[in-house]
Image: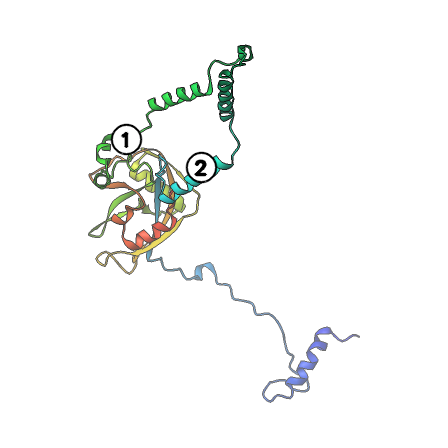
Amino acid sequence: MAVPVRRVLLRPLRGILTQIPGSGVASSGCRQLSVGLRVPVVQKPNEAVLESPSPWRLLGAVFVQRLAVLSRDRSPIEKDFAELLKQTELERSLLADHELRLLEDAERVSRKQEEDYDSDEDSGQDIVTAQDLEDTWDQKLRQFKPAQRVTGSIQKQLLNSEADKKADRTCLERCLADSLVLLVKEKIGSEDVWLLPQVQWENGETLRETAERALTTLTGNSIKATFLGNAPCGVYKYKFPKDIRTESCVGAKVFFFKALLGSGDLAPNKKGSHVWVSKTELQDYLKPQYLEQVGRFMVDL
């Protein structure tokens, strides 16, 4: 009969252990060495220890952004680069059809001034010359009035930079060349703090649904916005003031979600409860640490 494989494999190991005093393995082989895997003990559900609730509240906030309505003024370096491109285009480009027509008209005029000019050569030619077209275009350009860069009741307040600082920031029709962000004033403890619209997360909903509820709760259906993705674009953690902080509720973790304003505006419940501000104006309202987190995902589009 063949020797079992297990006994053959363990025989060299048993020979070594018999030489070690106190190993409990005798040379007679009365004790068998067992080799096996350690099976973890599975705890029954009723014996599982319940985890303690987190001391941090989960909040969903919405970053509502109104995109720029007008193109912004060029910076000095952008103006210099545009002038360089214009000069390069003028020097290296081919002549356009209108420019070729100007040359043909100039050549025709020079032929008319010659003594041997034959008027039959111009039979069938257009009476309207390229210069006539340019005169017509110039006249239309003088009649054209571009749209004003400011609209609404704040038009007179935005005539200069000093008046722009005093403009009504609750109005959405301002800073049309910049993106604006919605901020609301909330009372945390005994302090009034400017924040992005936020509400506390509830069981059974996703964080995006929490952010959507924050916007709906604040504005009702007066604002239509498009949320960008299901993942948060940023997170901010802060502690509550000491007068309202407890062991079971230390602070809050806020998850931000981006949304682009489609239409509508917010009707304030009370004066000064919300503002529409640009990126450079955020520092006038948000605290430094909060502003640092918001500035990471705010991009002027």
Is residue 54 visible in this depiction of the protein?
yes
Instruction: Find numbered disc 2 in the image and state the secondary structure of the residue it sits on.
Output: helix
Decide which of tag 2 and tag 1 comes sooner along the chain: 2
Q: Is residue 88 left or right of residue 219?
A: right
- Tell me the distance, in whole angstroms, between the alpha carbons under discs 2 and 1: 32 Å
Q: In the rendering, which numbered label is found on residue 151? A: 1
Horizontal and vertical percent position of residue 146: 33, 28
Front-most of residues 149 and 143:
143
Q: Is residue 1 left or right of residue 83?
A: right
Q: Is residue 271 left or right of residue 179?
A: left
Instruction: Find numbered disc 1 in the image and state the secondary structure of the residue it sits on.
Output: loop
Give the quarter of the figure containing the N terminus. bottom right
Q: Nearer the viewer, mark 2 or mark 1?
A: 2
Q: In the rendering, which numbered label is found on residue 86? A: 2
Q: Is residue 296 left or right of residue 268?
A: right
- Quadrant in the picture for residue 263: top left
